[in-house]
Image (cartoon, grey):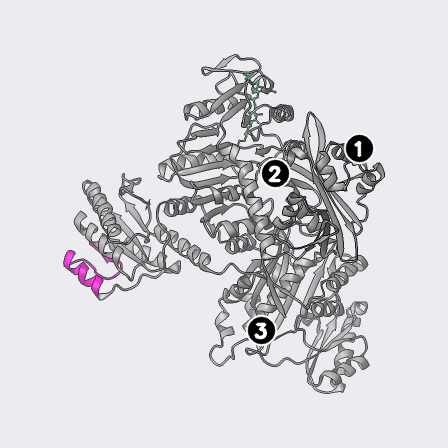
Amino acid sequence: MTRTRPMYVASLTEGEAEAGYLILRDGTTAMIRLAESKDRSALQMFVEGLSRESKRHRFFSETNPPAELLASLCDNSDPRSLLTLLVTRTWNDEQHVIAAGSYLAKEENTAEIALAVDDTFHGKGLGTLLLERLALLAIRHGFVHLWAVTHADNLAMREVFKESGFDVHEALENGDMEMDILLVPTETTVTRSEIRERIATTASLRPFFRPRSVAVIGASRDPSKIGAKLLEALIANNFKGTIYPINRHASQLRGLRVYPSMRDLPHPVDMAIIAVPCDAVLGVVDECANRNVRALIIITAGFAEVNPKGRALQERLVQQVREHGMRMVGPNCFGLVNADPAVCLNATFSTHFPPFGRVAISSQSGALGLTILAAARRLHFGISTFVSVGNKGDVSVNDLLQYWEEDPSTEVILLYVESFGNPRRFARIARRVSRGKPIIAIKSGRSPSGSRAAGSHTAALAQRDVVVDALFHQAGVMRADTLEELFALATGLSSQPLPPGRRVAIVTNSGGPAILSADACEAGGLVVPALSEQTTARLATILSSAAALKNPVDLIASATPQQYHQAIHTLLVADEIDALIVLYTSVTMSDNSAIADGIVTGITAGRAAGAKGKPVLACWMAEGDHDRSLMTNHETVPTYRFPETPANVLSKAASYVEWRAQPIGMVADFDDLNLPLAREICEKAVVRRGSGWLTTEEIRAVLAAMHLPILPGGVAPTADEAVGIAACIGYPVAVKLASHRLVHKTEIGGVRLSLHTAGEVREAFAAIRERLAHDDNLDAMEGVLVQPMQADGVEVMIGMTQDRLFGPLLAFGLGGIHVEILGDVCFRITPLTDCDAAEMIRGIKGYRLLEGYRGHPPADIKAIEEVLLRVSRLVEEVDAITEIDLNPIFAMPPGQGCHIVDARIRVGPVEAKANHI
Ligand code: COA
């Protein structure tokens, strides 16, 4: 039986829940970790510092609890019986505990929970965050209920429990409130946790984008140095807040008073831009912390990008930033821009300031950031905010996505990505953000899985950059292959509405470019439909007799501005059209401006007549007049240089619109999974034999634990037992070598099919044995697998390979030669939703075979979807599995299920396996 649950549950992977940082409701940060015995005195200080009221609520007494109790809370050696988390913040060079929470086993499935938050930190969401972490860890350690008792008047704590979104039952017992919390993630817990994360992240980033004051630390006297240029950019672009240059050796720079250090500033500062040499950065950050700076941009290079020493320095820097409750962009970055005229923040070392508009940009390359800012002006697309994330020590693209999701100035998001720090979090967040705002990304570099030696079909097929494609597809992210395409999409999507459908009209004054454009439309899945009689008739009345009235509508070389106007107006309002491409090839340079006017007024007329939601894109081919902008009073019409470009932009935009219209999808869960058994088998195999393939018997046990449909039969170590199994399952049977060492069985004569008698089974057993003995491989034989012959059905395959960074990558294709020769395979990353599974099956070219084609019976697609979802659960839950090949699977006609005929599962030590956190 299948249950479904929302997909965004496992937002914190193993290790992340026990230690990391929290973003509080006010946007500051704090560190969280398991308590250790050395924390006794810090915990004691925390407890003693609580107000009498807080002590009464936490310990049911206003006196301090005994030291032994606090000492026992610091022992996390057995998380099945007790676990304590501490939240810390550093000030005055000392780490302070600001919140603490524990659970204590009460019964087999229930743990008692208690927490307290420093009185000065109340109201910042700490209690809820602590409860969320404790709940997650309690679930991981086998608890199903949390239980708490509070004073009935402790409304704040009761609110924390209710706010968590878990099912909470309250009961008044002897004047106190007993609360039982059922630890089953529900849509509400997941949604609330997401909303909390989004609000807190947005609050923590606001000081970067809207600082009231900025300090430039390292503002050099030498105008050629980066520190001087940072100051210049802030001043030159009229930053609306206060600027404080910091330099020990100057008293005035560019007309501003200079302060020797942060300590000397007269007022608090929201943000500091740091451009001092690498070895001075930590000291400067410390000074910033002491002045309660909220946001740091660290331009300085020489950290993780250079060597292990730099990496260690960066780790210390990040730790220091987070412990002090600050946030940091960089290090090794080009800076940040907010082009909003109310802010005018250019916190980069270039004076290129882009026009204000709707596109938010994150770039992992500083140099490219500079190019993007320059291109924005040249290509007429406005920017809301720009961030060069550099080494992404703290603020990541995932954080920025959440900020931009909430930012009213941002309508399109552009990402230049070189590497993913946390691709699973990216998948989760981007999937949500894309529902509201288009994300366009360019990813350089190839997936690390490409260089891995392939041991299975799936691994061999996953050699290309498929994992990034799968990630972007599932998250609704439009992938640009080139910078040119990135800009083309940015200009198109930021200035025009999204196409409501795939039907495109093309209007042109020359045939060749129109054919190229129409071809590009069709190659991209768009339709260039025949025009209705009504539209054709209207065009006939306004165009010259030589004009071609079919789609593309060719106005011929002598096209007048008036004809462009009328054709555009007519096509824009035509019901059979969703989008319009306007092509213009200059014949005589002198006509250009008049034609541009004709195009612009035609669009204005079409819009006025009601065609508001249809995008118009243009191609302007005029020697010496390439960068013409077509602007009406209300919109900019993107103009491209080549006729294929608008087609490509519309095609990607249409696919995005379709993706957005799909239901969001749920991760399917199943009531009948025995995950502990599957995990145990795999982990034991690793302990016994190290990395390698599971034995046939182990594979069958794992698949059975997941209720995956394996063919009946079994493994027989002797010929007699093989005959016994054959008799049980009925003839004809197949006999196959069972060996975890020799996986390519056919090549060594290890597969015997269509055996009808006991004699044939014995003979097959002996032949396989003999062949192995001949090859000196007899000890690799575990026996034979005896299965019934599978006569009909469509052969499909399902596989999984681990990507070092992205985690499990699932593959689906037709079985046999289709997968090996044609490579007709669809990949997706896990966790798979029901929509992903349905789409994977429909995503291969051979799907028509599964629907039933020329005498082939159709296949049970629902059953294949279920296998995909069960395999997704298996690989998500059993970390030791590194590769799976279920090939072939025979899909029977609808309602009759499917049968896994051959299966391979490879396992490996968890530490050595993919790091997909
Ligand atoms: N507090 C305040 N000011 C300080 C300071 C401190 N602790 N330490 C140094 N300074 C001042 C210096 O006095 C100097 O000012 P001055 O020229 O008026 O004397 C200024 O900061 C710069 O110091 P300097 O030693 O001259 O450094 P630099 O300019 O040679 O290099 C960086 C500093 C950050 C630019 C350099 O270390 C760097 O990392 N460059 C690469 C940056 C980069 O590429 N980033 C990524 C872009 S995508």
Mark 2–mark 3 Cα distance, whole angstroms, equals: 57 Å
Residue 33, percent from left and from top: 72, 41
Instruction: Mark yes or no: residue 640 visible.
Output: no
Residue 641, percent from left and from top: 33, 45
Q: Which residue is mark 2?
A: 124
**In front of the other: 445 or 763:** 445
Quadrant observed for ligand 1 in the rendered image: top right
Mark 2–mark 3 CB contact (< 8 Å) = no
Residue 593, percent from left and from top: 21, 41
Horizontal side, residue 70 vs residue 327: left or right: right
**In front of the other: 169 or 816:** 169
Instruction: Mark yes or no: residue 524 visible.
Output: yes
- Circle nearer the N terminus (2, 1): 1
Mark number for residue 795?
Answer: 3
Mark 2–mark 1 Cα distance, whole angstroms, equals: 25 Å
Mark number for residue 704?
Answer: none
The range drawn in magenta is 534-555
Mark 3–mark 1 CB contact (< 8 Å) = no
Horizontal side, residue 648 vs residue 150: left or right: left
Q: Determine the image quadrant of residue 795.
A: bottom right
- Circle nearer the N terminus (2, 3): 2
Ligand 1 within 8 Å of disc 3? The answer is no
10 Å neighbourhood of mark 2: few (<14), some, or many (≥20)? Answer: some
Q: Determine the image quadrant of residue 651.
A: bottom left
553 drawn magenta: yes
The residue mark sitting in front, 2 or 3, is 2
Amino acid at pointer 1: Ser
Q: Which residue is mark 1?
A: 41
**In front of the other: 333 or 308:** 333
